């Protein structure tokens, strides 16, 4: 049939798979100019079941489920046209018997679970989930295919050619016991798939399909850590829960499985959080946040202004204190010469002993001496008629000049210190 046009529209390119129920062809859609997968019902197959499958897929529209484009009948054969998925199946990736990288396993498991969640929300159960029915599109995204093939009705088709081994390797205990399959049955099959992605092997191995069915029904599965000692702890826990014999002990559906998977990702992220938080806290102590630094920059000029006011106030207080009383103790001005007066009788003056006074240079507050000089000169009274000899001021008055500024400087330093301390090819596997 290669090269023939089917249903007046689809040019058949090559066969992709064939089973007792159907044949699948890669075809070219002549109207929309795209590649598609055409599945044609086998002459002796169950037409009603084929139609149920088409309706089930048509009810689903999700990025992780293979899309149905068309359904009809041509040449007396029902057919459905499906999305072409060119990057092969998960079975192709696992055929070598080696585990997949953990990150890839997490991603694929999450995408399968997301597709299952969408189907389960709409009351549909796949019942034949296995790596051959997980296909990848052109972007490498996993999509579930073959909904309902040989599993839309009652279980009991284990003897169908081409489906015994695949189904037997992933069948849930309740299906193996002849009980109805539900969403938790798909979760069990997904658990087997993830087990194989993590370890490269299956939890149950037998050359006999019926023995495999019995093992899934009766025997405890092999521990994931036995098959791979370094398996991630969270994934081991999820797989163990999914492989519980009792459906009530598993995640109840695809959404619950997805929740467990995402929660484990968050928990793994949080394990690294303490170290990151410690590093961040250390950075915060050494370099305060921008808002705090901004407040500190605003406080420093204010503290400086307060310091200047304290210095000026201290100097003024010092001058007023020493000039307001009588007697000695007044700080002498620097390089001040009093005029000589030849007339008028002698009068009392505090400057009698101060003619030409030279004081030592101040050490910390140079502005104090000039201020004192101005005030003292203004208050000097007339000297006696007799020329007064030059006298050197007592050295004991110099320390008083620097006392107030020194105290103020210390306070400013303390204030500043307190301020700055902050913190494939669509392989629709036919049975």
Image: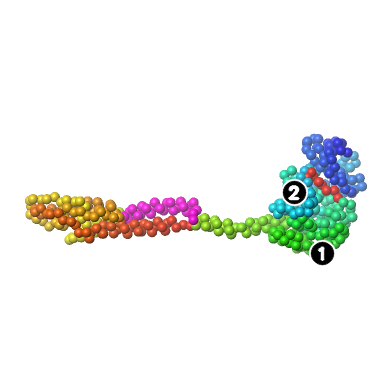
Above or below, 44 relative to 260: above
**Crowding near pointer 2: few (<14 within 10 Å), some, many (20+)?**
many
Above or below, 226 relative to 105: below
Residue 58: percent from the left, percent from the top?
Answer: 79, 46
Quarter-of-image position of residue 202: bottom right
Q: Badges 2 and 1: C-beta atoms under 8 Å apart?
A: no
Label 2 to label 1: alpha-carbon separation: 30 Å
The numbered disc on residue 219 is 1
Task: Determine whether the residue tagged by mark 2 lies in a helix, strand or loop.
Answer: strand
Residue at the image point whose x is 58% and y is 59% from the top: 274
Q: Is residue 158 visible?
A: yes
**Residue on which disc 2 sits:** 142
State the extent of the magenta-drawn residues as a range: 286-311
Horizontally, is 421 left or right of 250 in the view? left
Q: Nearer the viewer, residue 57 or 364?
A: 364
Residue 330: percent from the left, percent from the top?
Answer: 20, 58
Residue furthest to the right in view is 44
Which quadrant of the figure contains the N terminus? top right
Residue 120: percent from the left, percent from the top?
Answer: 76, 54
Q: Is residue 251 magenta?
A: no
Task: Determine whether the residue tagged by mark 1 lies in a helix, strand or loop.
Answer: loop
Horizontally, is 178 left or right of 342 in the view? right
Q: Is residue 118 visible?
A: no
**Crowding near pointer 1: few (<14 within 10 Å), some, many (20+)?**
few
The numbered mark, 2 or 1, whose residue comes first in the sequence reads 2
Residue at the image point whose x is 78% and y is 36% from the top: 33
Q: Nearer the viewer, residue 212 or 34?
A: 212
């Amino acid at each position: 049939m290669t090269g023939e046009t089917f249903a007046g529209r689809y040019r058949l390119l090559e066969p992709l798979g064939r089973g007792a129920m159907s044949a699948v062809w890669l075809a070219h859609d002549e109207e929309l100019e795209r590649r598609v997968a055409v599945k044609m019902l086998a002459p002796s197959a169950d037409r009603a079941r084929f139609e149920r499958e088409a309706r089930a897929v048509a009810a689903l529209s999700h990025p992780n489920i293979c899309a149905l484009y068309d359904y009809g009948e041509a040449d007396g054969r029902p057919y459905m046209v499906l999305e072409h998925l060119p990057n092969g199946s998960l079975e192709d990736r696992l055929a070598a018997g080696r585990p997949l990288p953990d990150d890839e396993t997490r991603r694929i498991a999450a995408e399968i679970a997301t597709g299952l969640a969408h189907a389960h929300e709409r009351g549909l159960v796949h019942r034949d989930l296995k790596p051959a029915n997980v296909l990848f599109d052109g972007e490498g995204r996993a999509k579930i295919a073959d909904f309902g093939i040989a599993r839309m009705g009652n279980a009991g088709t284990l003897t169908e050619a081409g489906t015994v081994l695949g189904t037997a390797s992933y069948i849930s205990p309740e299906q193996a016991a002849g009980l109805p399959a539900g969403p938790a049955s798909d979760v069990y099959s997904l658990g087997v798939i993830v087990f194989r992605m993590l370890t490269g092997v299956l939890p149950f191995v037998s050359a006999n399909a019926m023995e495999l069915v019995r093992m899934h029904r009766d025997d405890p599965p092999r521990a994931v850590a036995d098959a791979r000692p370094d398996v991630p702890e969270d994934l081991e826990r999820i797989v163990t829960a999914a492989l519980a014999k009792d459906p009530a002990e598993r995640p109840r559906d695809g959404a619950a499985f997805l929740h467990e998977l995402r929660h484990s990702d968050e928990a793994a992220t949080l394990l690294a959080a303490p170290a990151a938080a410690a590093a961040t806290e250390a950075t915060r102590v050494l370099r305060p946040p921008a808002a705090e630094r901004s407040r500190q920059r605003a406080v420093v000029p204010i503290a400086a202004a307060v310091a200047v006011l304290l210095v000026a106030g201290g100097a003024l207080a010092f001058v007023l204190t020493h000039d307001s009383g009588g007697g000695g103790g007044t700080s002498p001005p620097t390089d001040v010469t009093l005029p000589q007066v030849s007339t008028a009788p002698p009068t009392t003056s505090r400057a009698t002993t101060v003619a030409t006074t030279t004081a030592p240079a101040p050490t910390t507050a140079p502005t104090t001496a000039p201020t004192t000089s101005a005030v003292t000169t203004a208050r000097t009274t007339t000297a006696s008629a007799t020329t007064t000899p030059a006298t050197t001021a007592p050295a004991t008055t110099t320390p008083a000049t620097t006392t107030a500024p020194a105290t103020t400087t210390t306070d400013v330093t303390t204030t500043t210190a307190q301020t700055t301390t902050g913190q494939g090819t669509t392989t629709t596997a036919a049975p």
